[in-house]
Image: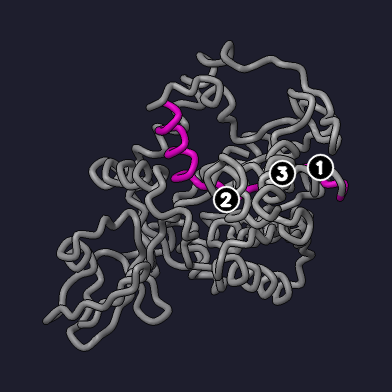
Amino acid sequence: MKVIIRRPRREVQMPGSRRVRDLLQELQINPETVLVVRGEDLLTPDEVVKDEETVEVVPAISGGSTDEV
Amino acid sequence: MKCRICTEKAVIETRRHNTAFCKECFLTHVERQVQKTIESEKMLSKEDRVLVAVSGGKDSLTLWEVLHRLGYQTTGFHIVLGIGDYSPAAREKVEAYAEKQGFPLIVTDLNEEYDFTVPELALNTPRVPCSACGLSKRYLMNRTALGGGFSVLATGHNLDDVASTLFGNLFHWHTEQLARMEPSRQATHPKLVKTCKPLIRLTERETLAYTLLRGIDYHEEECPNAEGATSLLYKDLLNQLEHASPGVKQSFYFGFLKKGRSAFAADVNGADLRECEVCGQATTTEVCAFCRMMDQAHRTASRRNS
């Protein structure tokens, strides 16, 4: 499968199928900080991504906005 | 994984609530969480004219979308900060969203109005870019809300933002800031506008999911000045804790509001507010921090150019 990780953008090829939670664990990405998307679908951790599919890991965390208003 | 409410296929798991939602139930859940926050903290009424600070990122556009859907009277406010390619891209996203939705939007360009961008302020004053940016945003948001007759200013701070700010304030024992960490702040001077943070019950991951599920085209790029920011380190540490112990961010922040904040009330600087001699905005000194920063930037730039 192809995994596109945004910000900084990089692509990772991973052989075989695996669940989203295992994919993130292998990539050492904390699931609390991202969403995994296939096309326009958000994937839950138990969802299986097949070998021929492409998914994107979208970052949720941004650095700004901590100023007290 | 099934939605715990309707048993349709789930699109997101929220471990801190020990649940999962389908698209429709998640969107409803987010909007209810915001309404609950607004009501419990007495942030807004349907009669308020609300100025919504919009950067173009997922949080501020989520806030604008949700407040509109909940029936509040909103106008967006975007500040063009002059940060490289980042600012024009942010402006484009905000204007495209406002136009698509037919929402009113006010745009202020810092450079057009004051002759300095954020990077130029950092170059010509002792302030680092994030400090110059934060001060400019706070000043312009209050000024615009006052001038436009808005009764409340709403910002898109989420649970990760406020929990990481709390984390930093505790680390450094910034007791006055700890006392001021309320989700909604009443105007304490005629030249100040009430502020509120209706997204504090939502994590960044949840606002991102809302944005994606609603098909909102947001500005995904990170501000170049945020690289290496301490706030990112705090967020990372808190999310490591959250992964090991779901719900810890929420209990940390809301526990502080309930049990901790009042302990620091005596540390609030009670200095009287007055009007700035230059601009008339509220300040504790003769000239407000924004006018002092601008004066210093002009003087330094003049020296550089002479």
Q: Residues within 10 Å of mark 3 (few under 14, many from 20)?
A: few
In terms of secondary structure, where does tag 1 sit? loop
| Quadrant in the rendering for residue A2 | bottom left
The coloring applied to the image is one colour
Chain identity of mark 1 = B
Q: Is residue A69 above or below residue B267?
A: below
Vertical placement of residue B16 versus A30, above or below: above
Quadrant assignment for the N terminus of chain B = bottom left
- Residue at the image point whose x is 81% and y is 27% from the top: B189
Which of disc 1 and disc 3 is earlier in sequence? Answer: 1
Residue B34 visible in the current orientation: no
Read off the residue under disc 2: B123
First in sequence: mark 2 vs mark 1: 2
Q: Are marks 3 and 2 on the same chain?
A: yes
B100 and A49: which is toward the camera: B100
Name the amino acid type tagged 2. Leu
- For badge 3, the amino acid type reads Arg
Kindly identify which residue carries mark 1: B151
| Residue at numbered disc 3 | B299
Q: Amino acid at mark 1?
A: Ser
Whether B152 is among the magenta residues is yes
